[in-house]
Image (tube, grey):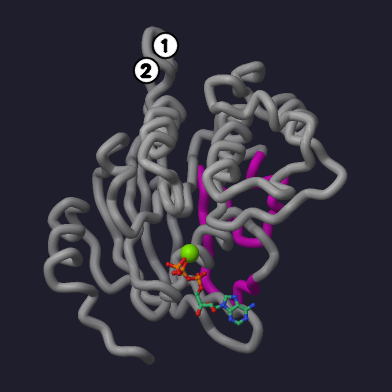
Amino acid sequence: MSLLEIEDLHVVAGDREILKGVSLKLEEGETCALFGPNGSGKSTLLATIMGYGMTTVTSGKIFFKGKNITHMSVDQRSKLGIGMMMQRPPNVVGVTLGNLVAATAKNGKGVVGVEKEFKMQDFMDRDVNVGFSGGEIKRSELLQLTAQAPDFVMLDEPESGVDLENIDLIGKKVHELIYGKEGTDNGGRKVSAFVITHTGQIMDYIGADKAYVLIHGRIAREGDPNAILEDIKTNGYGVEDE
Ligand SMILES: Nc1ncnc2c1ncn2[C@@H]1O[C@H](COP(=O)(O)OP(=O)(O)OP(=O)(O)O)[C@@H](O)[C@H]1O
Ligand SMILES: [Mg+2]
């Protein structure tokens, strides 16, 4: 069985069906890109895999490491080794970033004390995300993921809204998350990843083995990530509004 298998997933948010029968597979050690126009359901798909409760699965199944996780809690999924960097994570009033990173590391198997590498050393006593700028939120999320050290990492537009210098930092840190720190042994294993990107910038740092394109809640295309990205850049998505 593949690391992640999604079978005919239908998801509703509010009174709208957002995902209309998504099926896909992601193998162990694979990095997969997810493209698609705004509003096509990309963030909904990743949030549903993580189990964030903003959406309702009406039918279909999600398997991770052979287990049916469709109705598991976020906590259970996180313990199974799934981690996520959200596009717009919520503020967590009353919890400092330092406390969250420490708690995350306790449950996970990642490292602590590396906040300086993420330029987050002055943020550890602040409430999570409260008043953080867009780029600061991305670095904070990556620091939390590093503390968790998931086996499967989902990144929702990690480079979006980040200045060029910080894109380099984020790209290198995501590379470390997937391949391990240079000079260290990551068990010889590459962590699997599912990455939403509009620009493909993050792929320059981590590469991608395959890509899916999501349009109007359905997988419209899959294949070579670079070829698909070039095609989108040249021809657009070629879709009409629904
Ligand atoms: N609670 C909700 N009620 C109604 N519609 C919702 C709800 N949550 C999400 N949607 C809609 O679902 C659609 C898909 O949203 P989603 O955030 O998954 O898109 P996306 O592909 O990630 O887009 P982007 O590239 O802009 O980030 C959007 O049209 C959004 O408005
Ligand atoms: Mg999104």
Q: Position of residue 53 (x, y in %)?
A: 69, 64
Give, as a single range, the part of the protein colored magenta: 55-78
Q: Position of residue 146 (x, y in %)?
A: 56, 29
User: Is the residue 109 above or below the residue 14 in the image?
Assistant: above
Mark 2 — residue? Answer: 188
Give how far apart the Cα atoms at labels 1 and 2 are.
6 Å
User: Of the residues shown, which amino acid type is indicated by label 1?
Assistant: Asp
Q: For the point 59% across and 20% down, which residue is it?
A: 116
Judge whether residue 102 is colored magenta. Answer: no
User: Is the residue 9 above or below the residue 64 in the image?
Assistant: below
Relative side of 214 to 122, left or right: left
Which is nearer the eye, 11 or 72?
11
Judge whether residue 70 is colored magenta. Answer: yes
Disc 1 on helix, strand or loop? loop
Return the mark for residue 185: 1
Q: For the point 70% across and 32% down, which residue is it?
A: 123
Relative side of 172 to 53, left or right: left
User: Of the residues shown, which amino acid type is indicated by label 2?
Assistant: Gly
Q: Position of residue 77 (x, y in %)?
A: 64, 46
Q: For the point 18% across and 64% down, which residue is it?
A: 233
Which is nearer the eye, 97 or 106?
97
Q: Which quadrant holds the C terminus?
A: bottom left
